[in-house]
Amino acid sequence: MYSRDIKMRKRFLMNFCFVVSLCLLTVFSSCKDIGGLFKAKYQRTEHTSAPIANVAGLNVETDVGSITVTGADVTDCNITAEITVKAQTKEIAQKLAEEVKMKLESSDDTLTIKAVRPAELKKRALVVDFKIIAPRHMKLDCSTGVGTVTVSDIEGRIEASVNVGSIVCHMVVAELDLSSNVGSIKVKYADTAPAACKANITINVGSKEFTTPPQLSAQVLAINKRRLSQDRQANNCGW
């Protein structure tokens, strides 16, 4: 009798485990299918230009995406936005992507560039990558939540911030104010940079690389709250 009870209990436990396993498998499959509903993607590109006769500064903002600004001998600010939307279906993604618009706002001597999304489009479902060709003399203020900020051949003051991502400044000559929460910061000054400049560089988790011309005497404030990777410095600026 005792032996029969043990066998019945074992059989019950085996059946119970089998049923639980089936339930977990069903739930897992359902979650995977739900995640798959948001894998549809649609991309489109928008171009525009803005006169900058009385503009000295440029602000560029995106929640998720990269910002690339290149200085050139131009009289207008040429802007390209690559807009990517993820949704349940490609048709919905296309509809939402076409409702995302670039917005240019002028205030005093500053031009602000950003994307405006429809209310039903969540931030995490939208990626906007900006590529901008601007006059070399412009001052810059660029920010992205997740992405990369890349600046080259700009002669004005550069301010850039990212939450997760990297900042790269190449062939710059003026004051810098750069911050990244998690990522990396890389700076290379041009040989034509003035004898004195100021650079504030803040990073919580990541690495920094700072390269200056041999003759440059710079005031550098570099803050790294968690040194989880090695920093590299070239020439005469220490951390």
Image (cartoon, grey):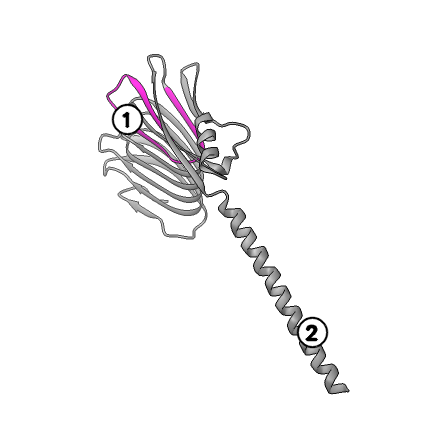
Specify the amino acid type for callout 1: Gly
* Mark 1 residue crowding within 10 angstroms, few (<14) / some (14–19) / many (20+): many
Q: Is the magenta stretch mostly helix, strand or loop?
A: strand
* Quadrant into which the N terminus falls: bottom right
In the rendered image, the vertical position of residue 18 relative to residue 185, given as above or below = below
Reading the image, the residue beneath label 2 is 12
Q: Please tell me which residue lies in front, 142 or 103.
A: 103
Where residue 178 sits: x, y (%)? 40, 35
Report the span colored magenta: 57-82
Nearest to the eye among marks 2 and 1: give it.
2
Q: In which quarter of the image is the C terminus?
A: top left
Residue 131 seen in the figure = yes
Task: From the top left corner, tell me how far across and down residue 188 is, in percent.
Answer: 28, 38
* Residue 21 as seen in the image, left or right of residue 76: right
Q: Which mark is residue 71?
A: 1
Q: In which quarter of the image is residue 73?
A: top left
For marks 2 and 1, give the CA distance. 74 Å
The vertical placement of 152 against 184, above or below, is: above
State the residue in front, 57 or 191.
57
Question: Considering the numbered disc 1 on the image, is that residue within a helix, a strand or a loop?
Answer: strand
Residue 188 on the magenta span: no
Closer to the chain start, of discs 2 and 1, is 2
Give the quarter of the image for residue 148: top left
Residue 209, above or below 92:
below
